[in-house]
């Protein structure tokens, strides 16, 4: 793998950038692999990378029906954070954030991690009590969290309307300074390039049409490129989890809904970090390019359509202007949607399945991007050892039988 | 934005309705007789098809009545609307997942 | 290069920068308008856009590119403009990234260049262009990662971005309207007007939306003949006819930006943008049209493609159609010496128009080897030099084009030896046309690639939509008109119009065309100088780099190079980039594919999507019937869904003091509380008791008439979702009281079970929360206050005990009274029809005067109920709390029947011993307040990570007990009563003890007073 650096960039500039090698190969699929990963998004690629890098399993194929990172990885609002309420979640997501913090150097690919902080706003007495409960929980778990007063918020983010006369005035908030955003494409491409360099076959335009099993053991996958044998198959396809699950005869606790995001035209820097409000439902950040990136709630019905409807856009923008009235005359440039796989408790469903050799990485819902490094690492461990990694033990399918749900939204009243 | 034909009020914009998810999920008649796994399946497992979905909707900002809808989850075409307790209209089932054009 | 020619051109421009010819169809040169750009004052005229006025004033550099800060001039005259983005006005009227081509000129208009310092003319950051080679596509992914991206980010962010966010709130407002029509026509050019004429004849509701300042589309910039008269006259006739046609609505200045399912479209009307800050502020600035159309005709036209050759981004190199539009519509010559460069016939008419108005046409340069047809003949007839089989090899002039050197075109984008050099100040180019199929694609339509015109055209769509004219790949005027008439008539018929006569299209001065020959880019010239995306500085070399690094998918190339991701969303660059990709990979263009088109078609003001849902109108404030009384008495209001008094401040009192005074008053004598928001749902029918027995975890069947019972509701997962007292009004009639915030949610919950699961039960439910106002009288003297009211109800303690219900009259008004308590004192909840709410409140206040009755607010109630250990669902429970956690195991065990959620309580996790249980907490030091949201830990200075044992959910300094108390959810809480723990909050801990939740009056004697 050619080393990327400023020096290397300058060297290549001298030859007009005519000699850069391929970021990854385009191999034809082999007849069989040790592990087949369905889904070439962040989670699938990261899993392949860690399988090769940490477990020496390099006879791995990542099958992507479209193009790498073309699903939710390339459609999300790129928030990274670990400010969860329950220890199980915080442990997992903070591990993920720590991996993110060194990811650019590990992958030798600038994933542009921008830790401008994630600020969660409170708009009532009740909100503030919940935020206290939440931030104290984080502090006890050793994760950075700080309560801020309205004045501190105003000084930090002057674009926010901190006036007490606002319809839902800002009472305060709490910030995780290590939270922020990363560049989604770079995460997918960085993992792809590093995995490919370790020998992983990344096969694009390869759609899985069936999963062959025998006696509750996975045998391989049928694809539009032919049958591929594998004793271990992982499904990491976000919104299409149920479709793939059905191929293996599984009915899963997942529904697929559109989640919209939108960006304004680029403007000069006016907003640091991410601002999120649960009561006034929106979250807002500014990309390095200068676009104001806005997300809201999921559309409220099932869909595989990868497009959202207008009412959610109207609601989300109204919420955004409530917080940031000065954005009124900016222009909305693009609006899109991803299909998110939502579990009953909105926590991930990851690990083993009732079918031997079939693994699942799903239920990431609206928050899968931040989980990519840890999701990949723990699933790789689980596949390599056929034993659930301890960090994802609480997030298995069995919790729906025992009732041990991990309902972050209900606990802290927040959106993912 | 979809338009949905409320069986009681007629055609209205999607904004007036709320979706209640998969239809025809029968509550077990005597839950205490169910195993944890059976109970979990009733509570959580969903078909979530890429294709025609039978789901229930409520005309929340209208007559507040619930009814069933057969809707395609890719192109959002509505194949049938039928009242609670009515049988699934024949022409809305059996549309294969493959007939989907994104 | 001929230096003489060069300096002469410059000299002319310097002597007489004005290029106004005074012949524009659509400007009024008698009315001059002054405006400023980058601090300099200029003059334009009525009918101008900012762009045409700048051009008329000889301003060549109007913007700087995003990445390399290269100087840029106008490329287009419309919404595809990538270069002329300006910061318009300031403060409450400020707008970043306004397209100069779309801003109608008004008196005093102020605009500044963007992304440039100190000005567009002299931008210091222009120096970045010298290091262009260091910044190929996505250079940042390969660098700037050591020591960390953070180290570089601040600088990069400051360099990026375009305009600036206004520093004041929007001074104008936005509206929305819903619109239903039989036929919606998008686009008011030749095809759109024809469609409207045909559809309008059917007498239906026909709406035509067009995004320009006036109707006419691209015809406004042309000189054509339709039906024997000028195209301008035809437009005027058509518009007049449509105006007179009943049922037809014309909406110019309205851009349709979104096409959603079920024929729902969204348009943005610029109502008074053209007036600038001088507009009537009572008028909306823009209006969002939400349109539901039975049939849609898209007549959205086409956008000309730039030609891709070295240094094709220099100021002065423009789209030929733009040069023509500036000339004919605005009467502005883009330059004095124009070279036209093309690979198709459409620029020939531009050459004729320029020539006929006295502008020097240096030459028409055609990449095709030997095009022969009426266009070529017409040019030759006017002695305009026609140089065929040639293309631009080199552009001279860094800050604006001064000359072009041509080379022989050997075919396929390969150039041969250098040929003539032509001095010029404008290059008008055309690489062919791209139909605007964005809306069609949004509607779900599929596309075909038309090899003949080298463009994507509509193929098929499941929605009721037709496409007409250039948007459909029809580039001849006659054909556009014919398609327009045909589509309009067909749409009207499909929407239910009778068999109206389909008017035939008038004849036009069309000439047969020689086919376009694609010229996608110059294969044997420096590709790092050939621009595709002018805004984001994407060059052919960037696509090459992407290809080299194996970014093959069209989406990958878009993201890797950022081509088409800029503010113009690739309107001029997408197809060229696709073609370059196709050429590099040896594929055909349709095999490369297209990216998905997403709304909005054209960027739209955020405020427009929001409309009036701003400020106070963001959400309605729900006010209590006695709202005015509360305010007059100093109520401290907070929004809890309803506007509710938290306490009533007396002179000199702060919040805490008021709460304490009120809480003390209730315990000492009597208080009154506005409980109107309390959820009230009537449940009626022969099966009402059976129904509620399934809903509540409690037994509902055994409840006696006129008695109330405190109940809990769970969801199927066994989690507590609401609580409250339910009352049996009659055998078949119940009143379900819910939490104040839960009324709507629980009402829907009940309806869903009844309508979807238990269709056999004969029950009706009705949410009557807002129909009844409620005054709760609470305290040792509550009964006396009730007795002082005029009522037919016997309030004697024996006749009306705790948890009983009575109906009757109070002061002559129908009243329902429930004895239930959330304070721990004897309490009467009096409900009367909401319209008597204020009267009841005043009557109770008067009746209580002798007992010094004290109005108390929600916060005081919270103190009282915390003392008493009463649960507050939502505060003392979280999304996992089940009834067992609340100590309800025994009552549940006694109930025989099933209820919602019961099965879940039998699962392993729901019976875990270490679950969080509801308990009381008491601070060791009674003066130290306990922090709500603090966590229970086992030592005074916990080492992180420390396991949390639960948390404090409510707390107060109890006036009645003179203690610091609270409630909480604590792991194994009930078996730990008496244990000392610590409450952690923000780095501090407070010593506390786990106790029973009932801090006060454990025996409940006061309830029965």
Image: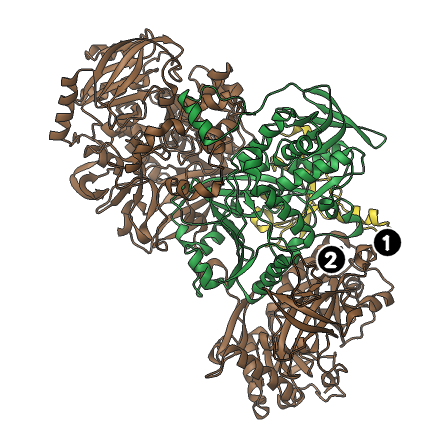
Chain colours: A green, B yellow, C brown
Residue C193 visible in the snapshot? yes
Extreme-bottom residue of the structure: C850
Mark 1 Cα shell of 10 Å, populated few (<14), some (14-19), many (≥20): few
Give the x, y percent position of residue C490: 48, 28
Residue B96 position (above or below residue C657): above
At x 62%, y 35%, the residue is B74
Q: Chain of mark 2?
A: C
Camera-nearest residue between A301 and C217: A301
- Circle 1 sits on which residue? B30
Number of callouts: 2
- In the picture, measured across the screen, residue C829 lies left or right of residue C461, that is right
Report whether mark 2 lies on the same chain as mark 1. Answer: no
Q: Chain of mark 1?
A: B
- Circle 2 sits on which residue? C715
Point out the image quarter for the C terminus of chain C.
bottom right
Give the x, y percent position of residue A178: 54, 50
Point out the image quarter for the N terminus of chain C.
top left
Tell me which corner region of the image, top left, top right, bottom left or bottom right, holds residue B32.
bottom right
């Amino acid at each position: 793998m050619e080393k990327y650096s400023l020096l290397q960039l300058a060297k290549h500039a001298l030859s007009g950038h005519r000699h850069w090698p391929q970021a990854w190969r385009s191999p034809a699929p082999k007849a069989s692999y040790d592990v087949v990963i369905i889904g070439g998004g962040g989670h699938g690629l990261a899993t392949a990378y860690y399988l090769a890098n940490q477990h020496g399993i390099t006879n791995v194929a990542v099958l992507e029906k479209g193009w790498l990172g073309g699903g939710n990885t390339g459609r999300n609002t790129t928030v990274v954070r670990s400010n969860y309420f329950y220890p199980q979640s915080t442990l997992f997501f903070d591990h993920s954030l720590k991996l993110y913090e060194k990811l650019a150097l590990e992958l030798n690919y600038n994933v542009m991690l921008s830790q401008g902080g994630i600020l969660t706003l409170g708009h009532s007495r009740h909100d503030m009590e919940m935020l206290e409960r939440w931030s104290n929980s984080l502090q006890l778990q050793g994760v950075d969290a700080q309560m801020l007063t309205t004045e501190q918020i105003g000084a930090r983010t002057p674009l926010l309307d901190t006036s007490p006369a606002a319809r839902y005035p800002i009472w305060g908030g709490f910030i995780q300074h290590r939270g922020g955003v990363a560049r989604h494409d770079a995460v997918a491409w960085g993992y792809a390039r590093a995995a490919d360099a370790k020998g992983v076959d990344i096969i694009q335009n390869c759609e899985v049409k069936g999963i062959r099993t025998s006696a509750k053991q996975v045998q391989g996958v049928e694809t539009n490129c032919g049958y591929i044998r594998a004793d271990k198959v992982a499904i990491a396809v976000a919104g299409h989890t149920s479709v793939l699950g059905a191929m293996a005869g599984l009915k899963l606790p997942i529904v697929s809904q559109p989640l919209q995001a939108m960006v304004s035209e680029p403007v000069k820097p006016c907003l640091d970090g991410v601002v999120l409000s649960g009561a006034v439902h929106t979250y807002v950040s500014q990309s390095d390019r200068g676009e104001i990136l806005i997300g809201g709630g999921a559309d409220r019905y099932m869909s595989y359509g990868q497009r959202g409807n207008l009412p959610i856009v109207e609601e989300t923008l109204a919420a955004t202007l409530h917080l940031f009235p000065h954005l009124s005359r900016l222009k909305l440039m693009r609006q899109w949607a991803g299909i998110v796989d939502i579990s009953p408790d909105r926590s991930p469903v990851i690990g083993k399945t009732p079918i031997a050799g079939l693994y699942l990485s799903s239920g990431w819902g609206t928050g899968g991007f931040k989980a990519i490094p840890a999701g990949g690492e723990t699933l790789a461990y689980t596949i390599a050892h056929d034993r659930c990694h301890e960090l994802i033990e609480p997030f298995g399918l069995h919790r729906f039988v025992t009732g041990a749900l991990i309902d972050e939204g209900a606990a802290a009243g927040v959106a993912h | 934005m979809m338009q949905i034909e409320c069986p009681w009020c007629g055609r209205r914009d999607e904004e007036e309705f709320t979706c209640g998810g998969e239809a025809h999920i029968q509550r077990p008649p005597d839950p205490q007789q169910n195993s944890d796994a059976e109970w979990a399946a009733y509570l959580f497992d969903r078909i979530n098809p890429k294709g025609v979905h039978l789901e229930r909707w409520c005309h929340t900002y209208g007559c507040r009545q619930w009814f069933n809808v057969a809707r395609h989850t890719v192109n959002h075409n509505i194949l049938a609307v039928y009242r609670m307790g009515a049988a699934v209209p024949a022409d809305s089932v059996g549309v294969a997942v493959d007939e989907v054009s994104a | 290069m001929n230096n003489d020619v060069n300096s002469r051109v410059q000299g002319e421009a310097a002597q007489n920068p004005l290029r106004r010819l005074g012949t524009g169809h659509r400007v009024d040169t008698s009315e001059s308008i002054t405006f400023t750009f980058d601090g300099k004052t200029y003059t334009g005229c009525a009918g101008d856009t900012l762009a045409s006025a700048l051009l008329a004033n000889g301003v060549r550099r109007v913007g700087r590119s995003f990445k390399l800060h290269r100087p840029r001039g106008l490329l287009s005259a419309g919404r595809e403009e990538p270069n002329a983005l300006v910061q318009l006005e300031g403060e409450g009227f400020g707008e970043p990234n306004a397209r100069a081509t779309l801003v109608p000129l008004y008196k005093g208009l102020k605009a500044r260049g963007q992304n440039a310092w100190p000005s567009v003319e002299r931008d210091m950051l222009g120096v970045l262009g010298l290091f262009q080679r260091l910044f190929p596509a996505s250079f940042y992914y390969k660098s700037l990662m050591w020591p960390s991206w953070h180290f570089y980010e601040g600088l990069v962010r400051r360099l990026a971005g375009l305009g600036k966010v206004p520093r004041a709130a929007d001074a104008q407002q936005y509206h929305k309207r819903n619109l239903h029509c039989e036929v919606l026509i998008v686009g008011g050019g030749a095809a759109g007007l024809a469609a409207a004429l045909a559809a309008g004849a059917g007498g239906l509701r026909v709406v035509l939306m067009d995004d320009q300042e006036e109707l006419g589309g691209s015809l406004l910039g042309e000189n054509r003949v339709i039906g024997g008269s000028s195209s301008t006259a035809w437009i005027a006739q058509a518009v007049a006819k449509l105006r007179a046609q009943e049922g037809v609505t014309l909406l110019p200045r309205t851009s349709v930006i979104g096409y959603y399912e079920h024929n729902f479209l969204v348009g943005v009307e610029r109502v008074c943008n053209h007036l600038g800050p001088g507009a009537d502020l009572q008028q909306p600035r823009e209006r969002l049209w939400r349109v539901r159309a039975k049939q849609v005709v898209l007549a959205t036209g086409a956008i000309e493609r730039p030609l891709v050759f070295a240094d094709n981004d220099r100021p002065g190199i423009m789209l030929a159609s733009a040069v023509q539009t500036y000339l004919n519509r605005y009467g502005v010559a883009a330059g004095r010496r124009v070279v036209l460069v093309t690979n198709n016939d459409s620029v020939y008419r531009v050459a004729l128009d320029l020539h006929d108005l006295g502008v020097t046409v240096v030459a028409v340069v055609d990449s095709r080897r030997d095009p022969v047809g009426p266009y070529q003949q017409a040019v030759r007839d006017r002695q305009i030099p026609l140089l065929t089989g040639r293309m631009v090899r080199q552009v001279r002039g860094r800050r604006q084009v001064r000359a072009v050197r041509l080379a022989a075109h050997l075919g396929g984008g390969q150039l041969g030896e250098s040929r003539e050099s032509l001095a010029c100040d404008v290059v008008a180019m055309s690489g062919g046309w791209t139909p605007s199929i964005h809306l069609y694609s949004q509607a779900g339509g599929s596309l075909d690639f038309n090899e003949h015109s080298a463009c994507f055209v509509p193929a098929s769509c499941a929605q009721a939509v037709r496409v007409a004219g250039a948007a459909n790949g029809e580039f001849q005027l006659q054909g556009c008109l014919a398609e327009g008439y045909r589509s309009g008539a067909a749409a009207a018929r499909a929407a239910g119009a009778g068999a109206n006569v389909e008017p035939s299209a008038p004849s036009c001065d069309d000439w047969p065309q020689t086919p376009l020959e694609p010229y996608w880019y110059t294969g044997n010239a420096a590709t790092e100088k050939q621009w595709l995306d002018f805004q984001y500085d994407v060059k052919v070399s960037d696509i090459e780099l992407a290809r080299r690094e194996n970014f093959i998918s069209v989406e990958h190339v878009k993201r890797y190079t950022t081509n088409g991701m800029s503010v113009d969303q690739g309107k001029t660059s997408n197809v060229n980039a696709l073609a370059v990709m196709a050429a590099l990979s040896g594929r055909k263009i349709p095999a490369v594919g297209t990216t998905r088109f997403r709304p909005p078609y054209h960027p739209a003001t955020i405020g427009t999507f929001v409309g009036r849902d701003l400020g106070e109108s963001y959400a309605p404030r729900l006010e209590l019937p006695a709202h005015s009384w509360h305010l007059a008495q100093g109520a401290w209001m907070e929004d809890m869904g309803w506007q509710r008094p938290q306490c009533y401040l007396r002179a000199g009192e702060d919040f805490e003091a008021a709460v304490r005074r009120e809480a003390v008053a209730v315990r000492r004598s009597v208080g009154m509380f506005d409980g109107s928001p309390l959820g009230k749902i009537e449940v009626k029918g022969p099966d009402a008791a059976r129904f509620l027995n399934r809903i509540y975890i409690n037994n509902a069947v055994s409840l006696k008439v006129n008695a109330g019972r405190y109940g809990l509701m769970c969801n199927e997962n066994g989690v507590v979702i609401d609580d409250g007292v339910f009352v049996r009004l009659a055998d078949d009639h119940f009143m379900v009281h819910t939490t104040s915030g839960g009324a709507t949610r629980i009402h829907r919950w009940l309806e869903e079970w009844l309508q979807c699961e238990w269709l056999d039960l004969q029950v009706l439910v009705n949410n009557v929360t807002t129909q009844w106002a409620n005054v709760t009288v609470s305290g040792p003297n509550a009964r006396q206050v009730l007795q002082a009211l005029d009522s037919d109800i016997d309030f004697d303690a024996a006749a009306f005990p705790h948890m009983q219900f009575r109906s009757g009259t109070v002061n002559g008004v129908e009243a329902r009274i429930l004895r239930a308590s959330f304070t721990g004192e004897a309490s009467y909840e009096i409900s009367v029809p909401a319209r008597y709410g204020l009267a009841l409140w005043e009557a109770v206040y008067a009746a209580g005067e002798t007992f010094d009755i004290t109005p108390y607010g929600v916060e005081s109630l919270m103190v009282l109920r915390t003392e008493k250990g009463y649960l507050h669902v939502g505060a003392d429970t979280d999304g996992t709390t089940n009834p067992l956690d609340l100590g309800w195991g025994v009552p549940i065990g006694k109930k025989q029947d099933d209820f919602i959620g019961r099965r879940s309580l039998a699962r392993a996790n729901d019976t875990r011993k270490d679950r969080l249980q509801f308990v009381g907490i008491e601070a060791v030091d009674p003066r130290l307040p306990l922090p709500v949201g603090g966590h229970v830990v086992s030592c005074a200075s916990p080492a992180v990570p420390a396991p949390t044992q639960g948390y404090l959910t409510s707390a107060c300094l109890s006036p009645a007990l003179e203690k610091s108390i609270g409630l909480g959810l604590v792991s194994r809480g009930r078996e730990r009563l008496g244990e000392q723990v610590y409450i952690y909050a923000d780095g501090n801990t407070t010593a506390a003890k786990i106790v029973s939740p009932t801090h006060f009056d454990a025996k409940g004697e006061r309830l029965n007073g």
